[in-house]
Amino acid sequence: MTAFVVIVLAGMGSYVFRVSMLVLAERARLPEPLERASGFVAPAAFAALAATGVAAASLGADVATAVPPLGAVAAAVAAVRLTRRSYAAPLVGMPVLWLLTALVGD
Amino acid sequence: MHTTDVIADVVATPRGYADELAGGARAMLPWLAGVVPFGLVIGVAAAQANISTFAGWLTGPLIYGGSAQIATIEMLSAGASPAVVVLTALVINLRLVLYSGAMAAYWRGTPRWWRALAAYLLIDPSFVVGSDRYERGGDHTRGHVHYLGGAVLLWVAWLLAITAGATLGARIPAALHLEFVVPLYLIGEVSRRLSDVATRRAALTAAVVAVVAFALPLHLGVLLAIVAGLAAGLTAQGVRS
């Protein structure tokens, strides 16, 4: 039940953001710092979520459990740098994760 | 322009508007290559999360923003406080205020039903496809139809991708660790965006703060990390300019 309420509230808030300036546009202008910050929202949010996911899989675990996710991240970063394609990250990272899990993991 | 005027205009030149509608859909096609895999990932995450798959799927039509959806699903699954989850999703979607502000100039004077619908469909790809067409000038009504062609295609593709991911995800064995597809996908998306110093500073700061603050209660770490990333990006940008 809580999950549904949270999702509905987040959805309603997002919709308010979408219509906000349509309603206010004729009377107000967005603060300049907020306008500049918008370009950093996606990279900051993605980096925070990715780091949290990696930390959840590797922090506090023994070495054998931590090696596969960290190895997969290293392989994913290398693949994106080499190919310049974002989808290369899961395409390369997941097989590396499976391989390292089979070799040293749980 | 009143509703009747819009309808009369569309009826008067149906061929031209059909072309605009198709043009908007065509302009959206390149975006789908990146968006559909992300939708599949969100669907898989919804199926594997500690919340009902339907609740996870519902983030699609209700929140309609990939990163905010992922954050909502992941944080709810991890047992984060409801207030923190809502706040995080809203911080991530704050950019929609900017898009709304940019589109307001083009949608001023349109019927209320149009603004309600167009605003609902407003997200990164539809904003780019729509504003690109409006900036080319000409009749705004044609721009609206172009926007609608791209935005509706995106919405349909997005929900189909999430549905497919959620359906597949529920049948996939846990030993495959598919929950790790999300961080890897996000790493790929971040790497793609690291074009300038300020963005690199924002992403790196957010990642470091997220790890350092990982153990914070209520999963406040993600929210803190995003805010720290924004501050770092703005500071770096200020220093350079």
Image (cartoon, rainbow, N blue to C red):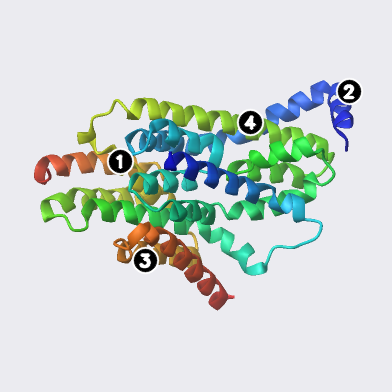
Q: Answer yes or no: do the residues labelled 4 and 2 have beta carbons within 8 Å?
A: no
Closer to the observer: label 2 or label 3? 3
Decide: is A81 above or below B164.
Answer: below
* Residue B46: mark in rendering: none
**Residue labelled with disc 3:** B209
Chain letter of mark 2 equals: B
- Secondary-structure class at tag 1: helix
**Residue labelled with disc 1:** B179
Chain letter of mark 1 equals: B
Q: CA distance from mark 1 to mark 3?
A: 22 Å
Q: CA distance from mark 4 to mark 2?
A: 23 Å
Are the residues under marks 4 and 2 on the same chain? Answer: yes
The local crowd at label 4, few if under 14, some if 14 to 19, many if 20 or more residues have their Cα within 10 Å, is: some
Decide: is B54 above or below A99.
Answer: above
Q: Quadrant of the C terminus of chain B?
A: bottom right
Q: Is residue B192 visible?
A: no
Image quadrant in which you'd find residue B8: top right
Chain letter of mark 4 equals: B
Please tell me which residue is depicted at 54% across the width and 78% down the height of the picture: B239
Q: Report x, y in % for residue A76.
A: 31, 48
Q: Report x, y in % for residue B77.
A: 35, 44
The local crowd at label 3, few if under 14, some if 14 to 19, many if 20 or more residues have their Cα within 10 Å, is: many
Residue kind at label 3, given as amino acid type: Val
Residue kind at label 1, given as amino acid type: Glu
Q: Earlier in the sequence, mark 1 or mark 2?
A: 2
Q: Report x, y in % for residue B43.
A: 41, 33
Q: CA distance from mark 1 to mark 2?
A: 52 Å
